[in-house]
Image (cartoon, rainbow, N blue to C red):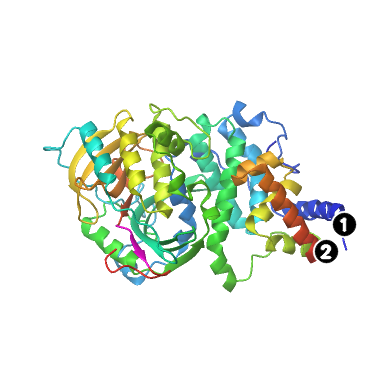
Amino acid sequence: MPLVNDLEQQLRAALDADAQRVRPQRPDPPPFAALSQRSRQARQRRRAMVSVPVCALAAAAITLVALTGPGSTTPAVAATPPRLVFDPTGAPPVSALLRRLSIEADKLPRIVAPRGGYVYFRSESWNLVVSVSNRTATSTLVPKVDEIWIGADGPRLQIQRDAAPITPEPLSAAEERNARKAVTTGPPQRSYLRPSDLGVFDSLARLPDSPRALFSKLAAPQGYGSTRLTDPTAVGRAINSLENYLDFSAPTPRLLTALYKMLAIIPGVSDAGWTTDRAGRPAIGIAVPADGVSTTILVNPRTGALLDIEDVQLQKNLNRVRVPAVIGYDVLFKAATVSALGVRPAQP
Amino acid sequence: MNFAIGDSEQAPAKDERSAKNGSFDEFCRAQYPAAVRLGWLLTRSSSGSEDLVQEAFLEVYRRFDSLTEPQAYLRRTLANRCRSWLRREMVRRREQPSEPPPGKDGPSVPDMQLLRAVQRLSYRQRFVVVARYWADWSEQEIASALDCRPGTVKSLSARALAQLHEEMS
């Protein structure tokens, strides 16, 4: 029987010998220097899903092509969804809008998992994923559908369906619609998540209500980095964190109320106007400029419900898109309670 | 303290200077090999660990100017990415054998038994064991990477050693 001290010594030796078997190649720093300043933690976390086989309908709808065609001197760019069209006519001033939204959001029904039951939440997203290899950056657009069942005590079941197209732009609205349909019928990936799997993004309940405190928490979720309201990078991180939280949790009335109050104190936030979101719902947009990417938060103007978050890249970089371009969106659907894991509500 | 523990071939240093005083490139070169090895010890996938490390560096790069401790941020990012990766690999690995070792020279048979026992630990226990006994991180550094209290690191470490001790008995 090994003594603990012997075991510790053996551990050191075994781990060291094991680690020495790996001969990593030197990294290629240059591509890092030209990549987007904007981070998308949750979306990159899911990059492992890119290799999932594309289903037959997606294969019909989406043609994979090389980044540069034969004889072509112009590098192809990644396909991006068409931009939403906004009508600013009659849109209220942003400060009044956010004040009203924070009041209305507070009246939204609070959806709580019943004893033994779950909260079901569904979202659809398209995200641009950048990978770096051999000094070359490759952009891939990844459409994805997420369904998540959240238990009262924290455990979650997440089912993801996705595809990984690289297409030459532009992508027409019809192509986008077809690809979205293809994703919903794609092969499911199941993950059972514990709260500890989600790191700092495990619970909305930990987020503060105060607008300034909420911004600080979202801008520096790990406790690092600037939390200045005037710092575009901090604003970008705050939006990013919000998206990360919403990857695993349905937005609550409390969060939305605090969110609209927080947006009201960020310099440069503006009213984008009226539009229709990706799911065809009437919406009003709140534009949040940050760090080369403009985020537009689409909400139901009557109830304050959060409908969609769209990111538009404004500055050219190695993302290989033709700016301005939609580099990601998350369409959020109404949450509902269900009786068991895997059960879907009649009309989510 | 940095990742480059026991990495004589490219290790610039164990000192603190490399992180903020140099460029991101220097930081990257200094930390990369040991980060990949840490990824390997946690995931048992040489290709997967390279991908995870590159993604982690990409994330560090995006915040590099605003980070006061990029090494700590890299550690935490890599810890989270390895955990997420393993979570998603679990289903696939049930159906496929684990990746063969990257090189022919490796640990002895008793050491391999111990390493297999390490792989059977929970992720957090395994992380603590690897960080403590291979990377020589302090309890505070491990706690920061795992987003938990130092006391939790102590208990994770004690339980991991007890389990390893039992399995090797």
**Where residue B80 sits in the image (x, y, percent)?**
56, 49
Magenta residues?
A: A334-338
The image shows residue A166, relative to residue A339, as above or below, that is: above
The image shows residue B10, relative to residue A196, as above or below, that is: above
Identify the amino acid type marked 2: Pro
Please report, as a chain letter, where disc 2 is located.
Answer: B
Is residue B130 visible to the viewer in this orientation of the structure? Answer: no
Asked whether A214 falls inside the magenta stretch, the response is no
Q: Which residue is mark 2?
A: B110
Identify the amino acid type marked 1: Leu
**Where residue A171 sits in the image (x, y, percent)?**
26, 54
Q: CA distance from mark 1 to mark 2?
A: 15 Å
Please report, as a chain letter, where disc 1 is located.
Answer: A
The image shows residue A131, relative to residue A1, as above or below, that is: above
Q: For this rendering, which residue is in front, B54 or A300?
A: A300
Is residue A254 visible to the viewer in this orientation of the structure? Answer: yes
C-beta proximity under 8 Å, tags 1 and 2: no
Q: Which residue is mark 1?
A: A3
* Mark 1 Cα shell of 10 Å, populated few (<14), some (14-19), many (≥20): few
Which quadrant, please, contains the C terminus of chain B? bottom right
- List the single residue furthest toward the front: A115
Which residue is painted at 46% across and 37% down in the image? Answer: A217
Secondary structure state at the residue bearing disc 2: helix
